[in-house]
Image (cartoon, coloured by chain):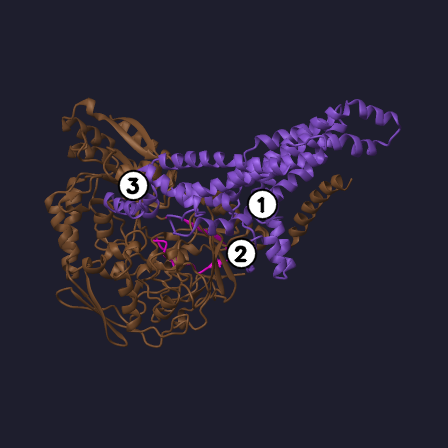
């Protein structure tokens, strides 16, 4: 008898608990809509709060209120609590709130350098080999120890001499920028006095400053790193990397927020740093909790229900839903830091023919893709890198002109049999620069068929073959793109696209004339701004001349937030600071 | 009985061994590798080769399998190739979340399914039976993720009755002791957080419990109807017993057996369903962990965690079989 009653009891309890919750649930659309919704996106773009004390933060709407916890949704969990050991955007977005470098980016921009823990941008020797930084004084780490030149040296040396097992997959960025040990381009880092650090390079490296704005080059407390065994060759055994111990024990930097706790796969909580050195730019929020959401629809539901206040990325197809809800706002990040292109393997026919490649360029109606798939949050590409990249210049690449495409195909002399193109797209992924690969592939194919090509589609899983097969040149034509590591020409033109392995060009495109390599080498080794400008300008001109692949667009992946979230300054590289964000409720 | 249990445990060994081979082959035959997951867009052929070598993936497959098997026999389930954490550590912290969810779903399915099935059986000729049939058809035919997202949209986004996802309000901090949220909130002396955890549990439990609910309802109904036609039930009624007494003493006791079997079998389905439910509800359990591991080709995590799942499934089946003997003393295992 008790058994049967038990079932009814369970059902009744569930209903009662559900109903009780109704009254205490988070504010609904009606409550939130009265809380001064404003388009933070447009106003935020014009404000330029900075971590440097010289530029004070200004509010997006009204006077910022202090307090409250922001719950932020991310597409995935943090990987490790030590930024030097991660290369994913989720970890970076979290850790950049806590750990600062010598230089950083002006908020809202992708390539404007500002000093952060240095008092000014460094002085650079004429040969481009010596960078001298003067450090801020009186800055303390979150564990109370002093930030000084010795701390900077310690941080660089631990990465330079990283255990073999951590190189490449964990310490990816240090390896990519400087290299390790004796192979490194970093000759020495020395503290000449407590507030002066001198970096010596073996050969000039023009990406030095821009690359070191990444959180991977942030300065962490040497005391905490040592105590937390941060250099253990097995990061699972390092309490520091595993985020154990809380504030002052793990992820110990100098930023406006301090690490509090990490429950893997569930949340990371940061709290306000009450003793932040840059008082004018101290955090308004008491805390931020980052939560991973594997499913984008579920994340949007959570935002609409008020369970989270901010979502790092939403699908462009959801922008309309967000905009039509008065309690929410869609956030345009402004400057793009990515590129999306149609890859062509120049070793394959007919892509070895310049006129065919140009014809493809004229055939694509880039704006129509932006309207259909990006909710307008993208710009047609006129370069192989986005406009906010250092040394960018417009290249006047082919724009939509189907008649011109047809005439180029006719004059190319390529036989009709070679106009059958095999076109690969990834079957199972959505990337910030490519939200709907199948839809985009079909739209592009339509445009190509309209000018006389015939298309055969092929597809592979993103991680189950697409990326690896594409990288070794197995595909004649495919869709791919890149999210910047830093907005420098080297990152897009070389690392992303046309790197050389010795003298051999990237097998993906099999394109790499000698003059391009010379321009790259000159650009990377440039010792002055003018020289860099000239070399990278030449490289861009060569690429425009040869059009080895077809740049399509640069997008700004939209974020979304509750209307009461104010003062957030988005950034195309997704490494945005939350110190200016406040809750208007 | 003891002999029977020992024999059943021994027979599980070849099953698990065979499964380890199947799992190993399956995950290694999938195209792609963990290097792609580790490097993402930075995966150049050179760097990929370096990382494969660091992880020992350049060894022949049988060597890798033998290494894995040796580890297993030593009780070592391996480490994640993504973050190097031992599989057993992560499993231990995430498993309570899945158990909590699965038990809640089972409670929902059993607690509603059995009364509903009995109710339908009592009204076989009436419209009530039709309604129950439609409910169970819905339960069995709606995919979990569709039901989950719909529940979120209606009950959370529109009505604001329940939270959409997670195990606890992100603004609340409760020290993790057992990793069972319902227990940890009580240990922390936070009845408010306990209610919050309970509210977070409702939607995923309904989504996950929908299929077992449908099956249990149908089986209970069929089983009750079956027993209803037995001579001893007619005799009981003829003796003039009240309908409730006939129901409890004579019908349900005999109708339990197939229902218990089905409940046991549902555990496998629930573990599989947890994979989807946990993803939709951002539930920190082993299901979501396995999904991410498969995407990342995190070999040891996938192999070992599914082996543990299989072990649990076998154990539950054994318990169900023993439960049989308890419910029906005529059944004796030897």
Q: CA distance from mark 2 to mark 1?
A: 18 Å
Rendered hue of chain A is brown
Chain B's colour is: purple
Residue visible at 51% across and 57% down in the picture: A564
Q: What residue did someone put label 3 on? A: B59
- For the residues marked 1 and 3, what is the alpha-carbon distance in whole angstroms? 40 Å
Q: Which residue is mark 2?
A: B170
Q: Which residues are magenta?
A: A557-576
Give yes or no for residue A568 being in the magenta stretch: yes
* Image quarter in which the N terminus of chain A is found: top right
Question: In this rendering, which labeled residue sits more in front, label 2 or label 3?
Answer: 3
> In the figure, B65 relative to A278: above or below?
above
Q: Is residue A551 magenta?
A: no
Q: Quadrant of the C terminus of chain A?
A: bottom right
Q: Chain of mark 1?
A: B
For residue A324, say whether it is visible: no
- Residue indicated by mark 1: B101
Rounded to the nearest angstrom, the CA distance separating label 2 from label 3 is: 44 Å
- Count of labels in the image: 3
């Amino acid at each position: 008898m008790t058994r049967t009653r038990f079932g009814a009891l369970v059902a009744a309890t569930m209903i009662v608990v559900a109903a009780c919750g109704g009254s205490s649930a988070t504010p609904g659309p009606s409550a939130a809509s009265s809380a001064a919704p404003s388009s933070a996106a447009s106003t935020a773009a014009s404000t330029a709060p900075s971590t440097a004390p010289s530029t004070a933060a200004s509010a997006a709407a009204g006077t910022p209120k202090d307090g409250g916890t922001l719950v932020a949704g991310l597409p995935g969990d943090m990987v490790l609590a030590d930024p030097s050991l991660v290369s994913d955007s989720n970890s970076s977005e979290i850790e950049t709130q806590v750990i600062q470098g010598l230089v950083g980016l002006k908020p809202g921009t992708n390539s404007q350098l500002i000093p952060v823990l240095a008092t000014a941008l460094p002085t650079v020797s004429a040969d481009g080999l010596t960078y001298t930084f003067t450090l801020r004084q009186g800055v303390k780490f979150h564990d109370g120890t002093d930030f000084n030149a010795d701390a900077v040296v310690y941080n660089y040396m631990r990465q330079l001499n990283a255990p073999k097992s951590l190189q490449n997959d964990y310490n990816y960025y240090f390896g990519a920028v400087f290299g390790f040990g004796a192979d490194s381009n970093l000759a020495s880092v020395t503290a000449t006095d407590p507030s002066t650090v001198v970096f010596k390079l073996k050969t000039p490296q023009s990406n030095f400053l821009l690359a070191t704005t990444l959180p991977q080059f942030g300065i962490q407390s040497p005391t905490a790193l040592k105590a937390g065994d941060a250099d253990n060759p097995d990061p699972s055994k390092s309490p520091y990397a595993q985020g154990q111990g809380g504030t002052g024990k793990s992820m110990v930097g100098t930023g406006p927020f301090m690490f509090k706790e990490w429950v893997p796969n569930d949340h990371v909580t940061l709290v306000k740093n009450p003793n932040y050195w840059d008082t004018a730019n101290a955090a308004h929020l008491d805390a931020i909790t980052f939560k991973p959401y594997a499913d984008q629809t579920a994340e949007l539901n959570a935002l609409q229900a008020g369970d989270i206040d901010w979502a790092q990325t939403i699908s462009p197809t959801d922008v309309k839903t967000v905009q039509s809800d008065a309690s929410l706002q869609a956030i345009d990040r402004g400057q793009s830091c990515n590129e999306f292109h149609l890859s062509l393997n120049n070793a394959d026919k007919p892509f070895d023919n310049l006129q065919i490649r140009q014809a493809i360029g004229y055939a694509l109606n880039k704006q129509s893709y932006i309207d259909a798939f990006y909710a307008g949050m993208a710009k047609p590409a006129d370069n192989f890198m986005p406009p906010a990249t250092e040394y960018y210049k417009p290249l006047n690449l082919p724009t939509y002109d189907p008649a011109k495409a047809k005439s180029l195909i006719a004059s190319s002399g390529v036989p009709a049999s070679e106009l059958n193109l095999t076109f690969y797209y990834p079957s199972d992924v959505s990337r910030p620069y490519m939200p709907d690969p199948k839809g985009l592939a079909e739209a592009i194919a339509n445009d190509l068929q309209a000018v006389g090509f015939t298309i055969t589609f092929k597809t592979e899983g993103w991680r189950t073959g697409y990326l690896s097969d594409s990288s070794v040149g197995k595909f004649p034509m495919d869709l791919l793109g890149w999210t910047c590591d830093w907005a420098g020409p080297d990152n897009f033109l070389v690392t992303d696209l046309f790197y050389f392995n010795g003298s051999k060009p990237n097998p993906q495109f099999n394109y790499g004339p000698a003059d391009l390599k010379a321009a790259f080498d000159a650009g990377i080794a440039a010792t002055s701004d003018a020289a860099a400008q000239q070399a990278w300008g030449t490289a861009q001109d060569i690429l425009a001349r040869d059009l080895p692949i077809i740049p399509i667009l640069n997008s700004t992946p939209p974020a979304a937030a509750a209307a009461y979230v104010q003062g957030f300054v988005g950034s195309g590289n997704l490494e945005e600071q939350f110190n200016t964000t406040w809750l208007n409720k | 009985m003891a002999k029977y249990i020992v024999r059943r445990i021994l027979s599980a060994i070849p099953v698990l061994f065979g499964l380890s081979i199947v799992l190993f082959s399956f995950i290694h035959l999938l195209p792609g590798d963990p290097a792609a997951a580790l490097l993402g867009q930075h995966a150049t052929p050179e760097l990929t080769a370096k990382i494969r070598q660091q992880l020992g993936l350049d060894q022949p497959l049988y060597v890798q399998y033998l290494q894995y098997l040796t580890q297993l026999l030593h009780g070592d389930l391996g480490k994640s190739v993504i973050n190097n954490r031992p599989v057993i550590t992560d499993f231990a912290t995430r498993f309570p979340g899945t158990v909590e969810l699965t038990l809640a779903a089972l409670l929902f399915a059993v607690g509603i399914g059995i009364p509903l099935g009995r109710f339908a059986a009592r009204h076989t000729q009436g419209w009530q039976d039709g309604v129950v049939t439609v409910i169970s058809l819905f339960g069995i035919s709606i995919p979990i993720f569709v039901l989950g997202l719909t529940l979120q949209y209606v009950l959370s986004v529109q009505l604001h009755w329940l939270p959409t996802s997670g195990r606890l309000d992100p603004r609340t901090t409760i020290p993790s002791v057992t990793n069972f949220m319902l227990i940890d909130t009580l240990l922390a002396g936070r009845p408010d957080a306990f209610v919050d955890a309970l509210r977070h549990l409702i939607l995923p439990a309904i989504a996950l419990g929908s299929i077992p609910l449908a099956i249990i309802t149908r089986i209970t109904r069929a089983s009750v109807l079956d027993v209803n036609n037995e001579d001893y039930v007619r005799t009981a009624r003829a003796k003039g017993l009240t309908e409730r007494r006939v129901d409890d003493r004579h019908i349900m006791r005999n109708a339990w057996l197939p229902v218990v079997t089905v409940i046991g079998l549902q555990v496998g389905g629930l573990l599989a369903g947890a994979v989807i439910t946990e993803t939709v509800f951002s539930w920190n359990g082993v299901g979501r962990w396995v999904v991410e591991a498969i995407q990342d080709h995190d070999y040891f995590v996938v192999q070992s965690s599914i082996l543990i799942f299989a072990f649990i499934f076998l154990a539950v089946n054994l318990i169900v079989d023993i439960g049989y003997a308890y419910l029906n003393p005529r059944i004796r295992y030897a």
